[in-house]
Amino acid sequence: MNTITPTTTLENSVIYGIAINDYNSCNGGKPSTTHETLTYTWTLSDGCAAEKPGFPIPSGRKLSGVISSLVQKGLVIADTEGPKDDRGIQLTEAGLVVFESIYA
């Protein structure tokens, strides 16, 4: 049984946006593996990520802070190279578990 890491509404928004994203390998569909969630940070604030009702995706510094929090919790892997908006980002196994609880 997987334990779900506690998350905030904003964190859930970003997790959902990473998973349901036009620029990951599922092309906006529901991913079943962490590899299928690989995308870029710019897609989260550029309308390429799905927003679930009640889960608006933050922008600017708030988005950056939420991503940092998700990395610290072990729910997201984020590149640290290059411009912030072009960095790769994807869910970890624990992040995928949280996504599944949100998606249900």
Image: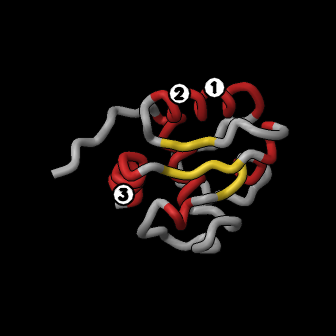
Q: Which mark is residue 69?
A: 2
- For the residue carrying disc 2, how many other residues have a C-alpha within 10 Å: few (<14), some (14-19), or many (20+)? some
Give yes or no for contact between labels 2 and 1 (Cβ–Cβ under 8 Å).
Answer: yes
Q: Is residue 10 left or right of residue 98?
A: right
Decide which of tag 3 and tag 2 comes sooner along the chain: 2
- For the residue carrying disc 1, how many other residues have a C-alpha within 10 Å: few (<14), some (14-19), or many (20+)? some
Residue drawn at (70%, 65%) of the image: 23
Foreground mark, 3 or 2?
2
Q: CA distance from mark 3 to mark 2?
A: 19 Å
| Mark 1, residue position | 65
Q: Position of residue 13 (x, y in %)?
A: 54, 44
Q: Nearer the viewer, residue 87 or 12?
A: 87
Amino acid at circle 1:
Gly
Amino acid at circle 2:
Ser
| Mark 3, residue position | 100
Q: Secondary structure at mark 2?
A: helix
Decide which of tag 1 and tag 3 comes sooner along the chain: 1
Q: Position of residue 28 (x, y in %)?
A: 61, 70
Q: Which quarter of the figure is the C terminus placed in?
A: bottom left
Q: Is residue 69 left or right of residue 43?
A: left
Q: Nearer the viewer, residue 102 or 67?
A: 67
Amino acid at circle 3:
Glu
Q: CA distance from mark 2 to mark 1?
A: 6 Å
Q: Position of residue 38 (x, y in %)?
A: 60, 59
Q: Is residue 74 left or right of residue 10?
A: left
Residue drawn at (53%, 67%) of the image: 36
- For the residue carrying disc 3, how many other residues have a C-alpha within 10 Å: few (<14), some (14-19), or many (20+)? some
